[in-house]
Each structure stands twice: as structure tokens, then as C-alpha cells.
Image (spheres, rainbow, N blue to C red):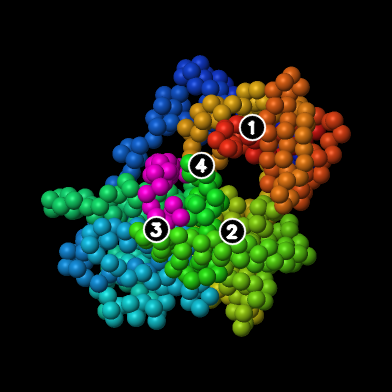
Amino acid sequence: MTDQAAYLGVGASLTGRRWIGPTAEEDRLAEAMAQDTDLPPALCRTLVKRGITADGAAAFLAPTLRDLLPDPRSLRDMEKAATRFLAAVKARERIAVFADYDVDGGSSAALLLVWLRDMGLRATLYVPDRIDEGYGPNDAAMAGLAKDHNLIVCVDCGTVSHGPIAAAAAADVIVLDHHLGAETLPPALAVVNPNRQDESGDLGHLCAAGVVFLMLVEANRQLKDAGQRGPDLMAMLDLVALATVADVAPLIGVNRALVRQGLTVMARRQRAGLVALADVAGMDQAPTSYHLGFLLGPRVNAGGRIGAADLGARLLATADPHEAGALAERLDLLNTERREIENRVREAALEQATERGLDGPLVWAAGAGWHPGVVGIVAARLKEATNRPAIVIGLEDGVGKGSGRSVSGIDLGAVIQRVAAEGLLLKGGGHKMAAGLTVAEDMLPAAMDRIAVLLDKQGAGALGPSDLRIDALLMPGAATVELIEKIAAAGPFGAGAPAPRFAFPDCQILFAKQVGTGHLKVTFGDGMGARIDAIAFGAMDGPLGARLTQHGGARFHLVGRLEVNTWQGRQSPQLRLEDAAPA
């Protein structure tokens, strides 16, 4: 909670949140920036929130990879990894890519497979089965790959896989990862990871695909120094963008430039797998970070969650439109099935967690037969509903496999890693916002209690309902498509860089009704002719839908994020409604 006065006097909104507006200093800086730059005040408020000054506004609004891309060699083992990788290419050695089963792993694998294909070399793809093998390298798989390959590249995994990498002694192993490293590194030829304990952490926000991309930048540089030309890396940024957004990496620094350029590449519709996936998902406009996170990402993930683990990577790597179409259709069906499974587990987990209590430093639930492929999504739902770190675990044959999601400011990955080192977990690891774990069922209560104690020391137990932070006031007549497009220059928006949130004060509800499955459609105005449409997804399941559909003529303050709605070729402003309060 903050001592700052409630914005518009809203101490408890319809969803129970306190509204917090910009500070007096932010107001002053935004007004000064608007005068100095002639940029719209609403955009200036967004820039000020990002810590951007008037002098730096122009550069921030037009980020370039040339300016923001770090020297790949600033990461330990990078030069060694790229040199060994190129030696394998030159000698036409047998290369295997061992990838995690999520979007980041699939995108990372696809980057390598596409790059190698452009160099005339085909690599073996290996993605472990989530249920049978679990996350990361295992002894049997690595030993088997080492028998038939000279080089194994582990992507989005491997940093803490000491035993499995030792089992692959017959081959060289390179690790390209971003998960939190332990005090010692596995016996790999190279471990490139910005979250190694001996790294500065300056690039800790990179996802694995970002690390793989930097390795390919270094490989291309070495090729150029040798008088050769490598594949076109700029054309591969669509894969980096997808992974960065889907893995919820913060859209700051170089990540922002990677995603921005990647969206431009994706809009050209030149990658067969992404074209097929966009078509099956019903995307009918230029891609945004929202589409990557909520339409494309979940479908790529669906194979690793409840289907064949390698489907996503195969889709992203294929150059065959027919194969892409078939894989996209299969992933779309699996995603529908995944949603049904998720809904069942979510209901059971929420009921159990509520009985246990939602006001402690950790919200958790565990159940027999809960599908390991959806526990991470359900943990995210619990986290969102409670503003608490959450862990959800599926139990089978005396062993629980679970996933956790954290809130801003609470490092869950470090806690999970510590509890694993203490022996209460069979294994566990991750990063600040997400982690995975395996636990013996009889150790479950003790492990969760210990995790809760450590999270409480970070302040998780003192968290209240999350304040709703608002960037600025706006009137309906000012919310134009032109303004939204100008604000978009401060994007792309997502994790670590949220889209600006606007409050529309003292508005009249002109139209409100339920649409679809539990969604709310609203039209509101200022009473002087200006009006704007709004959509609130899932609002009918909570207080927002009931109150606004039965407004009785009352006026409300409304809060949300602006977007452009495209319908039958026409564009109009739309508010993604998040909250409301009586005016």
C-alpha cells in the first residue's frame, strides 16, 4: 500500500482496489515534456513513467537494435560456444538440439534449426516429454544423443543439469539458457547464461531465445571475419519476439527492440509456421505483443503441455506450408483441450487454496491426477486472483510435479532453488517470476511451509489487494485512433513495460450487456456527445459486470487501457476495461 491519496477519491473500486494516480512530480515532468517536444500529453505521461526525459524521448520512441544490442562476447563462454558451433558446421558434424517444451524452448530450437538449414545442415531435435521425462536434460536422453552426435546444444535448459551433461561425455555440450544458475556449473564445454552467478545480471532479462540470437550474432561475426556470410538474422527476429513475450520477459532494453523489430518481421508473413498459426487463431490484423502472448503463445505451448512435446518447435522451424498447416491445426485442437483441462483444475485448486487461506505469503494447492501441463497456468490464475506467489502441484504415484508463479518484487526462483538444496524438494529451479519443482508427496506440507517462510521474509505475507496504478485522466473525445497509435510508439507493451492505463472520469453508461461467455460490452460517454466502446473480458464473473449492466443511470469513473478495434476494415478506439467506481 502507498501513502499517496486515492486517485479520484477511489479507495475501494468495484473490484476492491485503491486507485493510485501519477505523483505531482510526474505531472510536472509530463507537462514540461509536452511543452518541449510537442508530443501528446498522454504519451508524455507514459514516457515519464518509463523514466524517459525530454532529451531522450526521440531515441526511445525509435529504438534500434544497432544501438541497443549488446556485444555477445560480454557474456561468459559466448565466444567459446560460437567457435565450437561453427567448427561443427564446417566439419559437417552431427548436431543435436535439446530444447525445453515451452514457447521459449521451441523458438530457441527453431532459431538454431533454421540457421543450420540455411547453412545446408540438418540437426536432430529432441524435446523431452513433460510427463515421462520432466523438465530439462535427463541421463538417458543425453547419453543416447551423445552416442550418435558430436555436439549437443541445450536451449532454455541445462544450467543446473550436472548429472545429465556428465552422462553425455561422448559429445561436446553447449548450454544456451537464462534460468538461475547454481554455485557450480555443469561439465559442459560452454554455459552461456546471463543469470549465471558469476555474471553481472545486466542481461538477466533476456529469455533463452535472446541468448541463442546473440550466439548466432557472434557466429555470423566469426563467419564474416573469415570472409564468409552467415544467414539473415534480422529475418529470424519474429521467433525471438514470440519467445520474449510468451516467456513474460520484461520488455525493457534490448528486449524492447527485439520485440518491436520482430513484430515488423512477423507482419510480413514469411514464416510458414507462424502464418499457419495466425490463420488458425483468427488473427486478422498486424501482430502485437498481445497476439503473441494470448493467441500464438498458448497454441505453441499446447503441444508441450498435453500433446507431443516437439510440435511447437517443429511448427516454428518448418519451411513447408502444408506441414505448417497440419501442425497448426493439431496445436489449435490441443489448445482447446488444454483450456478444458485447465478449467477443471483451476476450480479445484481455487477451492482448495481458499480453504487453506488466501492471506498467507504463499497460495498453493495440490491434487491427484492434475495434469502437469496446466499447473503453471493455474498457478498464474491463483497469483492474479490473490496478488500472492502461487504454486500448483499435480500428484501421481507419490510424487508431485508443480509450477509456481510470483508477483513483482518477490523472487520465487531463488526460494525454490534454496529449498531444493535443503533437500525438501527432489528438484527445483527457475527465475524470479516462475519456477518448477518436483516433490515427494510425503514431504509436500513441510516443503510448502518452508517456501512460505522464505517468501514471507521477502515481504510476500504483507501484500494486500494490488493497487491499481493509473497514468492519466482522459476524456472520451480525446481517445482517438491517432492518439492510440502515437502512444503505441512507446511500446511494445507487456511484462515490465505495461501499456498506460487511463481513467475516464464521471462518465455516463450508454449501453452495457453481456457478450460471449461472461464478457461485458459497454458504451460510455461524457454526456456531451463524445462516446467510446469498451470491453471487459470475464467481467460477468465478478462485481464489475453486475454493477455496470444494472447501472440505473448512475455515473462512473472507468479505468482501462486503450486499443484500436478493427472491424470489417474500419478502425475505432476501444477501452480494455479493467475497473470502475461510482462517480
Marks 2 and 1 in Cβ contact (< 8 Å): no
So how many labels did they put on this image?
4
Q: Name the amino acid, label 1.
A: Phe
Q: Nearer the viewer, mark 1 or mark 3?
A: 3
Residue toward you, 387 or 34: 34
Q: Distance between the residues labelled 4 and 1?
A: 24 Å
Label 1 residue SS: strand
Mark positioned earlier in the residue sequence (4 or 1): 4
Please state which of the two labelled residues, at mark 3 or mark 2, is closer to the viewer.
Answer: 3
**Residue assigned mark 4:** 285
For the residues labelled 2 and 4, the Cα–Cα distance comes to 31 Å
Quarter occupied by residue 12? top right
Residue underneath mark 3: 321
Q: What stretch is highlighted in magenta?
A: 251-276
Indicate which disc, 3 or 4, sits on the residue closer to the N terminus. Answer: 4
List the residue tagged with mark 1. 502
Q: How crowded is mark 2: few (under 14 residues within 10 Å), some or many (20 or more)?
A: many
Residue 21 found in image quarter: top right
Q: Do the residues labelled 3 and 4 touch (CB within 8 Å)?
A: no
| Magenta stretch encompasses residue 271 | yes
Residue 421 on the magenta segment: no
Q: Distance between the residues labelled 3 and 4?
A: 20 Å
Alpha carbon distance from label 1 to label 3: 42 Å
Q: What residue appears at the point 70 percent right and 26 percent down from the top-left corner?
A: 531
Q: Residue at horizontal 73%, vertical 67%?
A: 348
